[in-house]
Image: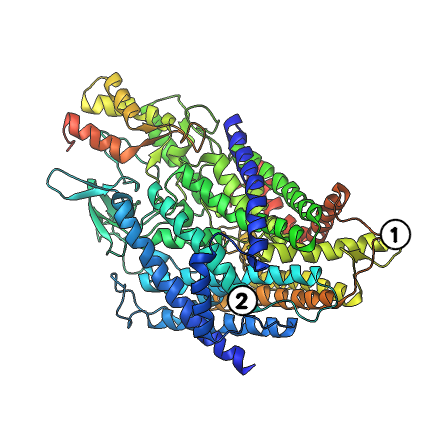
């Protein structure tokens, strides 16, 4: 670990702190339908959009209608993406590499993945998807799923803030306003900044470069194995060209990060130099993951009239973030003790540490920070391969997702995720003092707690059951690429990431099989919608309630004590659920590695 | 119910046109106008106008007269920029350890007794890393200089010229561009055959 590394991490957190208030206050205005500086440009587009799509913007929805509209929109957009993928070879536009149709199971998995804001990818983008599919199918969903997430978080905030009301807002309006006022204008500017750093943005066919030094390599046969001639010698082949994949990357990259989607244009995601060329682009990408989720904590405080509660939630998130990044940075900087004759010390001349799967321009600090940020939020973009992290370094992203990505979290999903834990925290605090728990003046009753428990139980249930099945059946284990405890971690990470709608992977696991495509696709749908519906039910129920004045027995949700309790509840729920699985995976692998064992 | 269904379909179409077509085309137009070089991948052209690579994308090198890039898991020859990928080998994977040991043995013949800078024997996340650390470049100076029969100080100077410090003084890590360094070597001292 180096001083410079810590400075970079500190600057990152300070910038997030600085962004929170202005962005959060702006979003509160947008969703309270107050005037903003963008109105002259955006308001006419909004009106036009409502006219075309027959939306009555004055209409207010009960939580059931809100949920129903959300499901219809998610269903319609998912179907369209599936159709685009299946028909991309027939469509006349923007397919310069002439990619064939995406096979059905993979197309289903990908459609579920992008609709649910997961962006789990069982395909290499630059060898599978046409530019049209990337733009109108995948990048489009980055907008849509993020806008849905923000809308849901705002609906939940309204549920807390409103008194004796039946309704929680209008889904179409919330979704449209988050797109037009927040995501789209930010992305236009942000995409151009990324281009200035070197992220490509074009629609041309792939380029071919003549290598400076042509390379001799062993030919690969049709069976995928290196070819050997009849004389027993390797059959060699001369590689003289380098094909350089291109595409409309920056426009997708911007919303991929800002919408906490994380699906890379290229297979290597944000480690690819065309997606993330410089340390500055890397910093901006990390900032844009946390920006909206952090801002939403301020929006929460503003819209519920308890700004200090918003900051208390922010503080709880920051505590968990610091724990995660410290562990990951420490573990990765220590390097791999199984490598001999290798200098892994950090010096002025090299970043050192565990560099397998990491880029030199990012080094250890930025790779550990990125891995923490992308899994604290439900982003899932990567700038280094998590599969090649040290066992404890890889444990951090895995645990982050297991804690339901409540550390700033996904756009919208992070806020309503942590609010579920807030409900549980005040419930537990209420039990301790023996009074009916209250949250910002609302009594938390059996119905609310039941719904919150439903959310917290479905998540581990689907992860652990599917991981267990996959680790004993041939159709599950045949996809493993690293033997020993690491193989179990690969499977566990896959289902955790998909249930949590994260999308990062221990990417050695071959997910493009019938089992993983189907089970994974369903996991993502359950992970998204089984969380949203109980959450909206709580929101609808809270909106109906009367407020009760705070009394001496009220547990205040604005204090450091509350932040600490919230952190404890999140950690205890996560630890109790997942500790056994973690000890068989990364913890065991760490102990074996320290004992010098390989697999 | 029916009304929401109609809206869902219309909203899908309208937003797909706006966000899926108009937005990327607008960004493409602006990018090509304002940053044409970056938007097209910063391609490097040789004397005869042939594209020889991209400033951002690494290339494989194996001859002793060139600085070597990091090992790569992208494609058969490595550095296949249409098949970006990391090795995804776990830290306890015997294949990883064997690969590193093999590379270490080869490199130690060059500079006996010197431990190998870790980035020189590990694959990058993309398989296309254009950089090596200054330590990894320094490690190779002796080999390149003796193969090309030039002064080590000359080579060291070229290395410095093709290095980049931390962005804004504190972001990222110092690094050496391997492709540009090798092109500079060829330009000054002729191609190695």
Query: In this orientation, which residue lies closer to the viewer: A452 or A487?
Result: A452
Which of the colour schemes (rainbow, by chain, secondary structure, one colour) is used?
rainbow
Q: How many marks?
A: 2
Q: Say left or right for B157 vs A507.
A: left
Asked whether the residues under marks 1 and 2 belong to the same chain, the reply is: yes
Query: In this orientation, which residue lies closer to the viewer: A551 or A110?
Result: A551
Protein chain holding label 1: A
Label 2's element?
A: helix
Q: Quadrant of residue A86?
A: bottom left
**Mark number for residue A173?**
2
Which residue appears at 47% of the width and 50% of the height? A381
Q: Position of residue A393 (x, y in %)?
A: 55, 41
From mark 1 to mark 2, how far is it between C-alphas?
Answer: 41 Å
Res A578 visible: yes
Q: Position of residue A479 (x, y in %)?
A: 47, 59
Residue identified by numbered label 1: A433
């Amino acid at each position: 670990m180096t001083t410079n590394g810590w400075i970079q991490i500190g600057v990152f957190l300070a910038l997030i702190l600085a962004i929170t208030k202005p962005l959060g206050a702006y979003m509160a205005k947008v969703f309270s339908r107050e005037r903003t500086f963008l109105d002259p440009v955006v308001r006419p587009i909004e009106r036009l959009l409502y006219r075309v799509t027959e939306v009555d913007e004055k209409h207010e929805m009960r939580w059931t209608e809100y949920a129903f509209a959300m499901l219809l929109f998610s269903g319609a957009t998912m179907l369209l993406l599936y159709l685009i993928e299946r028909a991309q070879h027939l469509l006349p536009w923007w397919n310069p590499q002439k990619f064939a149709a995406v096979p059905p199971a993979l197309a289903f998995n990908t459609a579920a993945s992008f609709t649910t804001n997961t962006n789990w990818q069982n395909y290499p983008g630059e060898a599978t998807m046409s530019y049209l599919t990337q733009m109108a199918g995948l990048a489009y969903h980055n907008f849509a799923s993020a806008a849905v997430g923000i809308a849901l978080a705002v609906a939940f905030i309204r549920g807390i803030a409103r008194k004796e009301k039946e309704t929680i807002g209008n889904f179409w309006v919330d979704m449209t306003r988050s797109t037009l006022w927040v995501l789209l204008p930010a992305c236009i500017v942000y995409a151009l900044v990324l281009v200035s750093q070197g992220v490509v943005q074009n629609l041309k066919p792939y380029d071919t470069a003549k290598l400076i030094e042509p390379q001799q390599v062993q030919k690969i046969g049709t069976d995928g194995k290196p070819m050997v001639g009849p004389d027993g010698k390797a059959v060699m082949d001369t590689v003289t060209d380098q094909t350089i994949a291109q595409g409309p990357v920056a426009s997708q990259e911007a919303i991929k990060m800002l919408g906490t989607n994380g699906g890379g244009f290229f297979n290597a995601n944000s480690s690819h130099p065309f997606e993330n060329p410089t340390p500055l682009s890397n910093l901006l990408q990390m900032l844009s993951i946390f920006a909206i989720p952090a801002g939403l904590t301020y929006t929460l405080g503003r819209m519920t009239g308890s700004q200090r509660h918003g900051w208390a939630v922010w503080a709880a998130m920051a505590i968990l973030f610091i724990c995660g990044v410290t562990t990951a940075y420490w573990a990765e900087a220590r390097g791999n003790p199984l490598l001999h004759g290798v200098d892994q010390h950090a010096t002025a001349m090299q970043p050192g540490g565990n560099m397998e799967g990491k880029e030199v321009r990012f080094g250890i600090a930025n790779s550990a920070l990125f891995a923490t940020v992308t899994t604290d939020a439900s982003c899932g973009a990567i700038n280094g391969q998590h599969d090649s992290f040290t066992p404890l370094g890889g444990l951090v992203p895995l645990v982050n997702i297991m804690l339901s990505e409540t550390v700033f979290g996904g756009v919208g999903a992070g806020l309503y995720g942590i609010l579920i834990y807030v409900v549980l925290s005040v419930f537990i605090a209420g039990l301790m003092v023996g009074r009916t728990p209250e949250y910002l003046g609302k009594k938390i009753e059996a119905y609310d707690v039941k719904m919150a428990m439903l959310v917290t139980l479905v998540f581990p249930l689907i992860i652990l059951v599917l991981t267990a099945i996959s680790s004993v059946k041939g159709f599950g284990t045949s996809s493993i690429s690293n033997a020993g405890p690491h193989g179990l971690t690969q499977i566990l990470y896959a289902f955790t990431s998909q249930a949590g709608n994260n999308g990062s992977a221990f990417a050695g696991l071959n997910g493009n099989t019938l089992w993983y495509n189907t089970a994974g696709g369903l996991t993502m749908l359950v992970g998204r919608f089984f969380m949203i519906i109980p959450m909206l039910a709580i929101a609808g129920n809270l909106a109906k309630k009367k407020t009760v004045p705070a009394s001496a027995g009220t547990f205040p949700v604005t204090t450091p004590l509350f932040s600490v309790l919230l952190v404890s509840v999140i950690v205890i729920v996560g630890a109790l659920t997942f500790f056994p699985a973690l000890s068989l995976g990364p913890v065991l692998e760490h102990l074996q590695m320290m004992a010098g064992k390989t697999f | 119910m029916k009304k929401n269904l109609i809206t869902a379909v219309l909203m899908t179409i309208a937003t797909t046109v706006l966000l899926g077509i108009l937005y990327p085309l607008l960004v493409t137009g602006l990018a090509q106008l304002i940053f044409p070089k970056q938007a097209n991948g910063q391609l490097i052209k040789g004397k005869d106008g042939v594209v020889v690579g991209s400033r951002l994308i690494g290339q494989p090198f194996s001859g002793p007269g060139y600085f070597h890039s990091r090992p790569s898991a992208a494609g058969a020859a490595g550095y296949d920029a249409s098949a970006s990928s990391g090795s995804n080998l776990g830290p306890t994977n015997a294949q990883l350890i064997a690969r590193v040991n093999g590379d270490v043995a080869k490199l130690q013949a060059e500079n006996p007794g010197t431990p190998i800078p870790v980035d020189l024997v590990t694959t990058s996340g993309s398989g296309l890393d254009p950089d090596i650390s200054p330590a990894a470049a320094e490690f190779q100076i002796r080999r390149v200089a003796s193969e090309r029969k030039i002064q080590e100080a000359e080579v060291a100077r070229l290395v410095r010229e093709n290095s980049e410090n931390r962005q804004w003084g504190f972001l990222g890590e110092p690094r050496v561009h391997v492709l540009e360094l090798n092109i500079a070597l060829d330009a000054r001292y002729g191609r190695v055959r």
